[in-house]
């Protein structure tokens, strides 16, 4: 005989729907974080925003998990899906896997763009404006030719998010210059953030 009669109860549909809803929300937020990292290389703001967005479904999931754990023997089959999704997303983001995939998919186009680095274009009636451009997986706010022959690709989100790529053809190393954090990507390329 079972010591706790509730353990033998079937899991109610309402509980299952609640877990599916919270898992779906967490999955959608996780996909958004992964897509943002794929198209912006490494965006700490996206990880923070995604973490904040996942708090509400996580609180609801925690309540459902406690109820499921106390009342239903097989709750974990569905109940542990959400934390697995969040843990996998966090690990992939911290290891920069989506960013590296986006970079690998865009590298050829970025090399071609760096070879013909565009300077700002003049727009009649306004000050200098920068040509917005999509190259590979990335949307750029503007592209600037550096005085030393390099090329800076500033990602969309500028000026609030100051991230981008820097191509330095003369093997100049940039380590913390101008208050930026630089990550060497190989073959004269750097990813930077302020």
Image: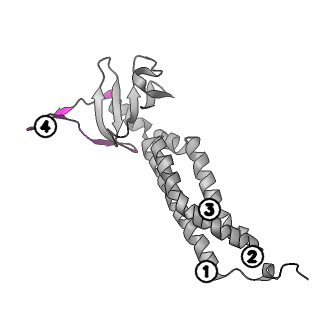
Q: Is residue 106 above or below residue 70?
A: above
Mark nearest the camera among 2 and 4 is: 2
Mark nearest the camera among 3 and 4 is: 3
Residues in magenta, as a range: 114-138
Q: Is mark 4 on a helix, strand or loop?
A: loop
Label 4 environment density (alpha carbons within 10 Å; few <14, some 14–19, many ≥20): few
> Upstream in the sequence, badge 2 or badge 4?
2
* 3D distance between C-alphas at marks 1 and 2: 14 Å
* 3D distance between C-alphas at marks 4 and 1: 59 Å
Q: Estimate the x, y position of residue 189 in percent, counting from the top left.
A: 44, 27
**For the residues bearing labels 3 and 4, Cβ distance under 8 angstroms:** no
Residue 5, by quadrant, is bottom right
Residue name at image x 63 percent, y 52 percent: 87
* 3D distance between C-alphas at marks 2 and 4: 67 Å
Query: Total of numbered circles in the picture?
Result: 4
Q: Is residue 164 above or below residue 19?
A: above
Residue name at image x 64 percent, y 70 percent: 64
Residue name at image x 84 percent, y 79 percent: 4
Mark nearest the camera among 1 and 2 is: 2
What residue sits right under mark 3 in the picture?
A: 82
What residue sits right under mark 1 in the picture?
A: 14
What residue sits right under mark 4 in the picture?
A: 123
What residue sits right under mark 2 in the picture?
A: 71
Mark nearest the camera among 4 and 1 is: 1
Residue 114, by quadrant, is top left
* 3D distance between C-alphas at marks 3 and 4: 50 Å
Label 2 environment density (alpha carbons within 10 Å; few <14, some 14–19, many ≥20): some
> Upstream in the sequence, badge 4 or badge 1?
1
- Closest to the observer: 115 or 88? 88
* 3D distance between C-alphas at marks 3 and 1: 17 Å
């Amino acid at each position: 005989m079972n010591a706790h009669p509730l353990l033998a109860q079937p899991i109610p549909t309402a509980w299952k729907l609640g877990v599916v809803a919270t898992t779906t929300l967490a999955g959608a937020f996780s996909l958004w974080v992964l897509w943002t990292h794929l198209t912006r290389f490494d965006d700490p703001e996206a990880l923070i925003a995604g973490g904040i967005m996942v708090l509400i479904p996580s609180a609801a999931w925690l309540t459902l998990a406690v109820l499921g754990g106390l009342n239903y023997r097989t709750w974990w089959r569905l109940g542990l899906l959400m934390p697995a999704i969040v843990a996998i997303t966090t690990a992939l983001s911290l290891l920069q896997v989506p960013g590296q995939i986006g970079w690998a998919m865009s590298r050829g186009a970025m090399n071609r763009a760096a070879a013909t680095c565009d300077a700002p274009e003049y727009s009649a009636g306004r000050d200098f404006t920068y040509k917005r451009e999509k190259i590979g997986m990335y949307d750029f706010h503007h592209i600037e030719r550096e005085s030393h022959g390099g090329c800076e690709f500033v990602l969309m989100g500028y000026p609030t998010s100051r991230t981008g790529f820097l191509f330095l053809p003369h093997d100049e190393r940039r380590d913390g210059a101008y208050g930026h954090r630089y990550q060497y990507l190989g073959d004269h390329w750097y990813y930077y953030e302020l």
